Image: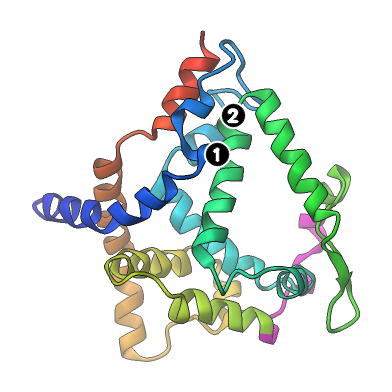
Amino acid sequence: MATIPVLHEFVVSQLQGTLTTAGSDEFLQPEFYAAPLGDPGLLGPDAVAWQVHADFPAMLIGGISALMLQSLHPAAMAGVVDHSDYQSDPMKRFWRTASFIAVTTFGSTEQAGHLIDLVRSRHDQVNGLGADGTAYDANVTRNSVLSYFDDVRGTLRATPAALDTVDFLLKRIELPFHQRPVYAIAARAAVDLLPVWARDLLGLQPRGLRDQITAAAARPLAWGFTTALRQALGPPEIAIAARARALR
């Protein structure tokens, strides 16, 4: 496709600052994942998670979409409102989450276990009552997680905190000027990923002609964006280093 080389150059130029910032995090350095040889980590290189988490465009768009979907859970949002500073420094929170995903997916067994224990200890402090009196707790048992998906749908609703979060993600997030076009495409694609019922609750269904045109353009734009991004970045170095470690 003729537009791909142009998109390639555009995406590379827009991401340079972002990736330079990420490069300062030890958890996003390939050297961190090089040892011990023969250790596949918690999941191993054949896991679906390795394939998905090694694809930065999928993680970026899917991550934004997941945040919007999470916003519909009142208890989750109560925890965010009471214990998170994501609006004051969204990129810090983004890279912190990216680091956790990278280590638990691609790290050695010891590295992943250590970080999971660290996050669990912090989540031990994230509990309380939401505005409606519903209790929330950032740690759940394995059985709770398995039953959670069957029970949660009926409790989801667009609280003021949910609407504020989505408005922040789509309109108010402060990014350097050169990163805004890339984020705008990713955010629009993230809305398109949401199930129809979630878009209805959040007021994100296309209403007027302008909204309909924007929604119709989301998928082709996202396709061009993700194709260019994959060409620009190539396979992630941390995944390459982790695979070499696991298969030795």
Amino acid type at image mark 2 = Gly
Asked whether 221 or 12 is in front, the reply is 12
Q: Is residue 170 above or below residue 226?
A: below
**Alpha carbon of mark 2 to alpha carbon of mark 1: how far?**
7 Å
Label 1 SS:
helix
* Mark closer to the chain start, 2 or 1: 1
Who's the residue at 59% across and 15% down the image? Answer: 36
Who's the residue at 79% across and 53% down the image? Answer: 122
Who's the residue at 52% across and 26% down the image? Answer: 33
Task: Please state if 86 lies on the left or on the right of 26 as rendered.
Answer: right
Question: Is disc 1 surrounded by few (<14), some (14 to 19) or many (20+) residues within 10 Å?
Answer: many
The residue carrying mark 2 is 107
| Residue contact at pointers 2 and 1, CB within 8 angstroms | yes
Label 2 SS:
loop
Which region shows up in magenta? 148-160
Q: Is residue 99 above or below residue 88?
A: above
The residue carrying mark 1 is 102
